[in-house]
Image (spheres, helix red, strand yellow):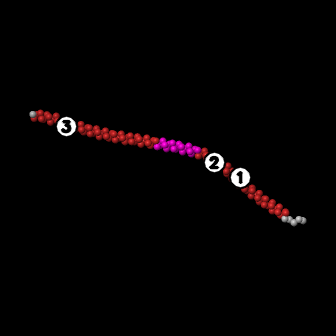
Amino acid sequence: MAENESERRTQDQPDELTDALNDLFTGVSTMIKSELQGTNNLLELLEKMNLRVTEEYNNYGDVAAGLRVFVEQLKHKSGNFEEYLQQINAIDQQVTEFEAVISMLDKYVSMLERKVQSAYQLPPS
């Protein structure tokens, strides 16, 4: 009987060792799966963030393209105003010249008026 008991303990010990090792490997496996799931979650989050940043930069690209078109339109309009500005400057120059001519004519007319008045104020001879 002592031999049966000894064999039984020997058989129970490997079962306990096997159970302990199975528990250990199950725990390690669960830990590794959790770590991998955490890493996978982080990668999914990173992917979503990258997609969001890409979308945002695409929006910036659209805004930049719109601004470029707007600037081109302003340049075109500015070119049209340049023509009008040259016309205004030419008119201003002509007005300045006309003012000088009018000033000379005014002085000449004033001189003629004085001559006419002096001619009419002479006593008859």
Residue 22: image location, x then y, percent:
24, 37
Q: Which residue is mark 1?
A: 94
**Distance Cα–Cα, label 1 vs label 3:** 115 Å
Q: Quadrant of residue 39?
A: top left
Residue 78: image location, x then y, percent:
61, 47
Is disc 2 placed on a helix, strand or loop?
Answer: helix
Residue type, label 2: Phe
Residue 81, disc: 2
Q: Label 1 neighbourhood size at 10 Å, few (<14), some (14-19), many (20+)?
A: few
Q: Label 3 neighbourhood size at 10 Å, few (<14), some (14-19), many (20+)?
A: few
Is residue 14 covered in magenta? no
Residue type, label 1: Gln
Residue type, label 3: Glu
Residue located farthest toward the left when viewing the structure as drawn: 1
Q: Which residues are magenta?
A: 56-73
Which residue is depicted at the point 69% across and 53% down? 92
Residue 40: image location, x then y, percent:
36, 39
The residue lying toward the viewer, choosing from 26 and 93, is: 26
Is disc 1 placed on a helix, strand or loop?
Answer: helix
Residue 16, disc: 3
Which residue is depicted at the point 90% across and 65% down? 125
Tally the numbered discs. 3
Residue 63 horizontal side relative to residue 36, left or right: right
Of callouts 1 and 2, which one flags the residue occurring earlier in the amino acid sequence?
2
